[in-house]
Image (tube, grey):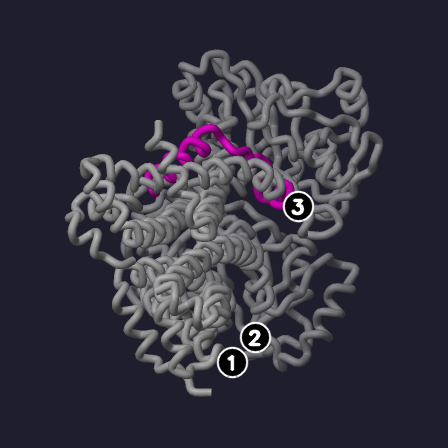
């Protein structure tokens, strides 16, 4: 018990140095936590994917569409419960910087396979009645201050012209993992307008979202769908929603890898600072350690003092850093909502933060602890800081 | 005012080797991250800027943003082609290339992950408009055939695209007949073939973009005004260089914002490291400071001496960090460019600007970390300082 007190007293003896070290640790733990959260956000789409949803797309690549009549053929495949055409609209609101995801979907089958999108009954009915209506996510509504009844004009990039939509419903995500910064509108509205404006681009579907009865049989169902269209003008590729989302992540893998590397570099930076602090502290206290030994305390006790002090500082920094991570991540998520619809600090991230801080505390005390344990009483007493 | 000899600062650093190494090492890592981020951004910009020629214009559908999303009907392309500002080359042919740009998904070598590659169907003048493109192996595709030529980065990173191999897309087999090098530009990450053949196999009626060379680059504004006001089409007219710069904007901004945020956060850590070291240096040497003052050195000299020591630490860190970062020039990164939704390879590029910026950054860190301890040292009273020893 008294040794714990000694450790704490020791740690607080050089208030300035300890304070600076703790601030350094806080910054590092915070940066590490944010970077890990950025990596998590990258995988958010894949993590929120459900095993009973498949994605059918043109085998050449996503930019090639498929004809609408595929819908009936896919629906007839055994094990398929629902099919929803789904087109990426890719418009922007007022300025290209104001970008958010917009999808043209067949609302009833789509919402049936996305139970995590909660829409109030009356709002849903109003949306279904209005062909130019739109459902928007809560976060999106907050970002631009959209309310029910508002008109949103979007400049199309893939589909030329200015399109106007009326907000009829706002959906809420079932949990923090659900992306609630999207806008959904009627696929029929898109299709019929395109048929009028440029008939060749009518009845073309970007991807089909397919709901299946048995997630265990997703691979077979996918193969059965692809077999239907083999050797046709638009061959298909069907994969689980998760694989589809991971495909996007994989394409930007280099960035994810870079962020991961950098997040560990920050740990090394702080390790250097912390190790330096402990080295200096131990060097200055050599006479004290020698005195302790002269009083009969063993080398193990002296080493424990050094380790204890290092760990106490590391834990202090880690605790404050973790506590700060949440408000800073919330601010970060609000600022970068455009890039990362889902930005949540996970329990795994917090665990990693604490583990890294502890690791830094232990490693920083290794050399000084060993030196303190090995110091010969006479030399230690003679040493000057 | 007589300065304290620099050797005094240098020898102090040398005496505390571990502490010096740890502090400078921390700074070196920060400088490395700072420089690497700037190099990455510079590399991305260089690749995309090198893609565009100053006297070329790109015409795409209004607000399409990139070529893949764009569509220009044949009749519109013919109108664009006949504009008087467009140069006429050898044989009286207009220097215009009507291009069909699509994406195909191909598995990457090593990981097997399907990745989007840009496939560009170019017109007969397409090569003349891009003087930076030259064949390094095999030959260029023959117009009107199902031959394709692949960019150097694609040949390095994807399977099945070597000369003589066949690639299947758009319901046809395409024979790879050569590899071209486009000088590190975005074209290195593309596959080129004949425009009309591509239009047929992808069943397109509309081109993606029209590229043309101007007789005189100064006539750009006139052409832009006329075409953008033309009621027969809704198009954007851009200089090719500007067009590709915009393609890199989102990614470059992302790299810069993330990188600079990180650098600032890291630099706080490194500054604290420097501050701890310098404070310790001051408190360990209180007696020496008193002796120096007693010998006649002024407060200012003591201040400068300790600042010099902090700066020396920073410069050590800068040299090590930049040295590490310059090794990154050997690394080429390939990732998906969000704006074009396709594979793009680029290298880390070290520019003189980055060398200077990182030096300024390191010196700032050293000064910021050293100034408080140095002031502290300078303000010590001679008697107190001598007594402390």
> Are the residues at dot 1 and dot 3 in contact (C-beta closer than 8 Å)?
no
- Chain letter of disc 1 in the image: B
Q: Residues within 10 Å of mark 3 (few under 14, many from 20)?
A: some
Q: Residues within 10 Å of mark 2 (few under 14, many from 20)?
A: some
Q: Residue at x 42, y 82 (%)?
A: B297
How far from the left and from the top, in percent, is residue B145? 41, 57
Q: Nearer the viewer, residue A249 or B342?
A: A249
Q: Residues within 10 Å of mark 1 (few under 14, many from 20)?
A: few
**Gap between marks 1 and 2, in whole Å?**
20 Å
Labelled disc at residue A99? 3
Q: Residue at x 67, y 71 (%)?
A: B82
Q: Mark 1 = which residue?
A: B90
- Would residue B292 be seen by someone viewing this image from the given angle? yes
How far from the left and from the top, in percent, is residue B330? 31, 63
In this rendering, the answer to whether B104 lies above or below A216 is below
- Name the quadrant containing residue A366: top left
Residue interval drawn in magenta:
A334-360
């Amino acid at each position: 018990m008294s040794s714990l007190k000694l450790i704490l007293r020791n740690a607080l003896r050089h208030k300035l140095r300890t304070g600076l070290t703790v601030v350094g640790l806080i910054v590092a733990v915070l940066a590490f936590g944010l970077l890990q959260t950025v990596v998590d956000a990258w995988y958010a789409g894949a993590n929120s994917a459900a095993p009973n949803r498949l994605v059918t797309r043109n085998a050449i690549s996503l930019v090639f569409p498929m004809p609408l009549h595929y819908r009936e053929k896919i629906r007839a495949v055994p094990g398929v419960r629902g099919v929803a055409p789904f087109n990426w609209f890719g418009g922007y609101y007022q300025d290209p910087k104001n970008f958010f995801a917009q999808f043209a979907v067949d609302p009833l089958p789509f919402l049936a396979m996305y139970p995590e999108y909660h829409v109030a009954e009356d709002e849903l009915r109003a949306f279904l009645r209005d062909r130019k209506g739109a459902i928007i996510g809560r976060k999106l509504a907050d970002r631009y201050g959209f309310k029910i009844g508002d008109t949103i004009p979007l400049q199309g990039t893939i589909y030329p012209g200015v399109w106007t939509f009326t907000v009829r419903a706002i959906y809420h995500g079932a949990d923090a993992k659900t992306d609630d910064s999207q806008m959904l509108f009627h696929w029929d509205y898109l299709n019929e307008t395109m048929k009028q404006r440029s008939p060749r681009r009518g009845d073309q579907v970007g991807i089909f979202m397919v709901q299946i009865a048995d997630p265990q049989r997703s691979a077979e169902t996918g193969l059965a769908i692809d077999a239907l269209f083999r050797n046709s003008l638009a061959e298909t590729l069907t994969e689980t929603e998760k694989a589809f989302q991971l495909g996007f992540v994989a394409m930007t893998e280099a960035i994810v890898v870079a962020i991961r590397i950098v997040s560990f570099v920050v740990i090394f930076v702080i390790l250097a600072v912390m190790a330096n602090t402990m080295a200096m502290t131990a060097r200055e206290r050599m006479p004290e350690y020698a005195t302790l030994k002269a009083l009969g305390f063993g080398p193990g006790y002296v080493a424990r003092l050094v380790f204890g002090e290092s760990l106490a500082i590391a834990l202090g920094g880690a605790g404050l850093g973790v506590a700060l991570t949440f408000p800073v991540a919330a601010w970060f998520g609000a600022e970068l909502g455009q890039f990362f619809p889902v930005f949540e600090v996970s329990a795994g991230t917090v665990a990693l933060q604490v583990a890294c801080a502890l690791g830094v505390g232990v490693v920083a005390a290794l050399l000084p602890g060993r030196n303190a344990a090995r110091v010969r009483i006479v030399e230690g007493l003679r040493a000057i800081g | 005012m007589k300065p304290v000899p620099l050797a005094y600062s240098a020898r102090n650093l040398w005496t505390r080797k571990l502490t010096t190494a740890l502090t400078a090492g921390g700074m070196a890592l920060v400088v490395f991250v700072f420089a690497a981020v700037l190099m990455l951004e510079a590399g991305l910009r260089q690749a995309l800027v090198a893609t565009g020629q100053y006297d070329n214009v790109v015409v795409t559908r209004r607000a399409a943003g990139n070529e893949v999303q764009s569509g220009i009907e044949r009749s519109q392309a013919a109108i664009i082609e006949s504009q008087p500002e467009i140069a006429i080359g050898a044989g009286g042919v207009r220097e215009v290339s009507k291009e069909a740009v699509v994406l195909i998904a191909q598995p990457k070598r090593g990981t097997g992950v399907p990745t989007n590659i840009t496939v560009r169907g170019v017109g007969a003048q397409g090569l003349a408009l891009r003087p930076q493109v030259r064949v390094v192996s095999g030959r260029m595709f023959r117009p009107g055939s199902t031959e394709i030529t692949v960019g150097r980065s694609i040949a390095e990173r994807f399977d099945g695209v070597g000369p003589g191999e066949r690639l299947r897309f758009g319901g046809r087999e395409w024979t790879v007949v050569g590899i071209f090098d486009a000088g590190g530009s975005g074209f290195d990450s593309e596959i080129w073939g004949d425009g009309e053949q591509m239009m047929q196999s992808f069943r397109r009626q509309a081109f993606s973009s029209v590229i043309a060379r101007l007789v005189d680059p100064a006539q750009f504004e006139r052409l832009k005004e006329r075409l953008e006001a033309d009621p027969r089409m809704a198009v954007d007219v851009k200089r090719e260089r500007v067009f590709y710069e915009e393609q890199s904007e989102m990614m470059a901004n992302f790299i810069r914002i993330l990188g600079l945020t990180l650098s600032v956060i890291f630099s706080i850590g490194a500054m604290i490291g420097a501050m701890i070291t310098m404070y310790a240096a001051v408190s360990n040497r209180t007696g020496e400071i008193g002796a120096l003052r007693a010998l006649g050195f002024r407060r200012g000299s003591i201040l400068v001496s300790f600042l010099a020591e902090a700066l020396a630490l920073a410069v050590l860190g800068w040299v090590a960090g930049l040295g590490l970062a310059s090794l990154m020039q050997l690394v080429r990164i390939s990732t998906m460019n969000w704006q074009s939704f396709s594979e793009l390879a680029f290298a880390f590029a070290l520019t003189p600007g980055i060398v200077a910026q990182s030096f300024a950054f390191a010196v700032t860190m050293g000064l910021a970390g050293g100034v408080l301890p140095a002031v502290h040292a300078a303000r010590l009273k001679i008697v107190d300082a001598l007594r402390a020893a």
